[in-house]
Image (tube, rainbow, N blue to C red):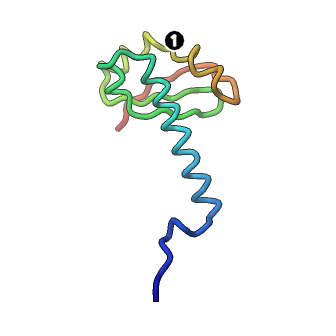
Amino acid sequence: MSFKPILEFHNLAIDKLVEQVKQQQDLLSIVKRVLPENLAEHTLHCVIHDVTLLIYTDMAVWASQLRFYQETILATITPLVEKPIKRVQIRLQK
């Protein structure tokens, strides 16, 4: 008797979660491209919540540096997403 791997089952909830993770990874990739290499290394996650782009980093010093790039990030991301992004928030990952 053979068993079907769990990821081969069609599940709408899992499909939606996988799609959200892919979108967040794509978003992170775009953000990292507009940042200097040392800053991009410390940019960990990006999530869109309503009209806000949340960017997560690992240390306060990098959060401070990311704030200088908010306008550049916003200008790069806004044309690529469905809903308009109005602001960027930098947060520390706990």
Above or below, 56 against 77 in this view is below
Q: Secondary structure at mark 1?
A: helix
Between 5 and 15, the one nearer to me in the picture: 5
* Residue 64: quarter of image: top left
Between 20 and 10, the one nearer to me in the picture: 10
Q: Position of residue 43 (x, y in %)?
A: 38, 27
Circle 1 residue: 72
Side of 78 where 45 appears, left or right: left
Residue at the right extreme, as displayed? 83
Side of 8 where 33 appears, left or right: left
Residue at the bottom extreme, as displayed? 1
* Residue 66: quarter of image: top left
Q: Position of residue 14 (x, y in %)?
A: 57, 59
Q: Position of residue 70 (x, y in %)?
A: 49, 14
Task: Inspect the image, locate mark 1, and give the three-letter code of the amino acid beneath it.
Answer: Thr
Between 13 and 32, the one nearer to me in the picture: 32
Q: Residue at x 58, y 14 (%)?
A: 75
* Residue 63: quarter of image: top left
Q: Position of residue 89 (x, y in %)?
A: 50, 23
